């Protein structure tokens, strides 16, 4: 029985409710009156239910699909402006006891090179990331109680936050590790992590169990209920995601929104972010063996539907996606992207050799951070290295109220300009710096408050004079 307030995975992700939703959405895919009503509700920026959003995903009326894209773009601008927050993944260890059939780190892969960074190697990787200009990381590690215990992850977080190198600093560490206990989530919270990210991979229980034939991750309930334990452990900001391509995308989409509704119902705050990875090629993984792959058009539709269904939730795409796909979906509501990512353990210090096989997936976008920053600005986006909310304690519902009160232009916007200025000053090539300074000068006018604008101008001058780390 479907119950968003339940703490049992199979009740808040109720299989029958998902199926009924898909049937209802298919039935109304050409129902112009209903679709217009849903679009009108979405335009109020109060979000949509999983049933309503599923109708938009199924919609077969081309003009209504166009209206959906326009609305997604409008909501993106209303809540996130033209900023795109930058981050990089940092792979700590690819030892793993699980057997996910879509991931080359699975325990039965005997020919992949296994690596685990020492604290000295973590420091070297972080310095390499700082030297590119990154301020925000997502830590990644396989599940291996002996090789990657929580104490190892905590040591890595301490190492990362402790490194000061020239003007560099990692100011926010998000963590993507296996589902764990409330007690261990509390330790992560105390170590000062930003968002805890855990991809569900697939919400379809039967498929889930087949795709995870052995290891602790096989337990669907343990995995699906992880965000509740994280929140019980005091982590306010959690990031959801599914791996598109494993199951039918309409199923995943409806269930993903049900998960968001569940978090809101039980904890009073929805997910901080939603990631939308698609399955990619990697060592011993051929994405073509999964027959639920989605094309770029469907991928764009999913992004637009997420944007209008959960306007307060950030949306993340990674370098799994090519430059062309990123260009297509950025205007539809993506708020964070990774740049210059290495998906192998130790990949930032050691150039990845041709035959490197320790990467979790092949990266489609191989540009440098400077190139990505320049490309974003050329497209009219402001690359932002802002980490202010987390450091000001604006997490969970406090972050949501910042969003809901539409203070983005008086807060995120100046923060984006200040952190971009730091980047231009410390790391950018001369050509990128010239484009960026021009952009900052123009974007200052968009700050509504005279007081905030004046303070931003003072801080920009102070950055030029060598000071760092200003924030609103
Ligand atoms: S997806 Fe994660 S848990 Fe599964 S094999 Fe890969 S690293 Fe291990
Ligand atoms: S001010 Fe907060 S919400 Fe805005 S970009 Fe910075 S961290 Fe994100």
Image (cartoon, helix red, strand yellow):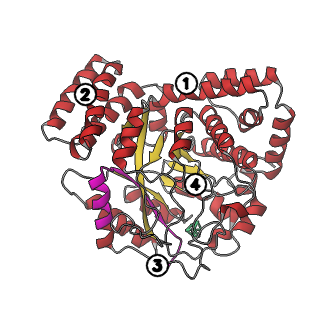
Name the residue beneath numbered marker 3. 147
**Mark 3 and mark 1 in contact (Cβ < 8 Å)?**
no
Q: Looking at the image, is mark 1 or mark 3 earlier in the sequence?
A: 1
Please determine whether, in this image, residue 8 is positioned above or below residue 254: below
**Residue shown at 16% from the left, 41% from the top:** 467
How far across and down, in percent of the image, does residue 300 sit? Answer: 63, 39
**Label 1 beta carbon less than 8 Å to ligand 2:** no
Label disc, if present, on residue 227 of the rendered structure: 4
Separation of residues labelled 3 and 2 (CA atoms): 46 Å
Query: Can you see residue 390?
Result: no
Q: Quadrant of residue 120?
A: bottom left
Query: Can you see residue 426?
Result: yes
For marks 1 and 2, give the one nearer the viewer: 1
User: Does residue 138 show up magenta in the picture?
Assistant: yes
- Residue stretch rendered in magenta on the structure: 124-146
Q: Circle 4 — which element?
A: helix
Label disc, if present, on residue 74 of the rendered structure: 1
User: Does residue 345 show up magenta in the picture?
Assistant: no
In the displayed structure image, the side of residue 158 where residue 378 appears, left or right: right
In the displayed structure image, the side of residue 145 where residue 167 appears, left or right: left
Separation of residues labelled 1 and 4 (CA atoms): 30 Å
Label 1 Cα neighbours within 10 Å, binned few <14 / some 14-19 / many ≥20: many
For marks 1 and 3, give the one nearer the viewer: 1
Name the residue beneath numbered marker 2. 456
How far across and down, in percent of the image, does residue 6 sit? Answer: 70, 50
Q: Looking at the image, is mark 1 or mark 4 earlier in the sequence?
A: 1
């Amino acid at each position: 029985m479907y119950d968003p307030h339940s703490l049992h995975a199979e009740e808040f992700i109720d299989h029958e409710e998902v199926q009924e939703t898909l049937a209802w959405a298919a039935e109304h895919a050409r129902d112009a009156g209903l679709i217009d009503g849903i679009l009108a509700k979405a335009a109020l920026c109060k979000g949509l239910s999983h049933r309503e959003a599923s109708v938009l995903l199924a919609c077969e009326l081309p003009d209504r699909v166009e209206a959906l894209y326009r609305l997604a773009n409008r909501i993106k601008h209303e809540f996130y402006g033209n900023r795109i927050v930058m981050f990089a993944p940092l792979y700590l260890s690819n030892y793993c006891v699980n057997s996910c059939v879509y991931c080359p780190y699975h325990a039965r892969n005997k020919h992949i090179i296994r690596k685990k960074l020492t604290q000295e190697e973590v420091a070297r990787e972080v310095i390499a990331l700082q030297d590119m200009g990154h301020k925000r990381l997502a830590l990644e590690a396989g599940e291996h109680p002996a090789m990657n215990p929580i104490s190892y992850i905590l040591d890595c977080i301490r190492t990362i936050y402790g490194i000061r190198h020239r003007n560099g600093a990692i100011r926010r560490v998000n963590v993507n590790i296996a589902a764990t206990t409330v007690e261990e989530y509390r330790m992560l919270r105390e170590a000062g992590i930003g968002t805890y990210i855990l991809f569900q991979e697939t919400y379809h229980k039967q498929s889930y169990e087949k795709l995870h034939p052995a290891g602790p991750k096989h337990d669907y309930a343990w995995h699906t209920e992880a965000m509740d334990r994280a929140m019980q452990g005091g982590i306010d900001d959690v990031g959801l995601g599914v791996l598109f391509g494993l199951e039918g995308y309409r199923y995943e989409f409806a269930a993903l929104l049900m998960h968001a509704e569940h978090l809101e119902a039980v904890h009073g705050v929805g997910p901080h972010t939603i990631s939308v990875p698609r399955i990619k090629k990697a060592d011993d993984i051929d994405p073509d063996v999964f027959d639920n792959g989605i094309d770029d058009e469907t991928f764009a539709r999913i992004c637009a539907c997420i944007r209008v269904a959960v306007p307060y939730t950030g949306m993340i795409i990674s370098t799994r996606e090519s430059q062309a796909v990123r260009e297509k979906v950025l205007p539809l509501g993506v708020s964070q992207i990774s740049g210059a990512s290495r998906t192998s353990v130790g990949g930032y210090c050691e150039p990845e050799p041709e035959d490197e096989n320790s990467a979790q997936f092949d990266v489609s976008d191989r540009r440098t951070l400077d190139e990505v920053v320049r490309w974003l600005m050329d497209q009219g986006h402001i690359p932002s290295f802002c980490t202010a909310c987390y450091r000001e304690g604006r997490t969970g519902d406090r972050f949501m109220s910042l969003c809901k009160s539409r203070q983005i232009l008086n807060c995120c916007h100046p923060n984006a300009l200040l952190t971009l200025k730091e980047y231009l000053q410390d790391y950018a090539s001369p050509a990128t710096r010239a484009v960026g300074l021009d952009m900052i000068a123009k974007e200052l006018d968009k700050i509504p408050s005279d007081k905030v604008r004046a303070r931003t101008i003072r801080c920009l001058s102070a950055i030029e004079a060598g000071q760092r780390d200003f924030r609103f």
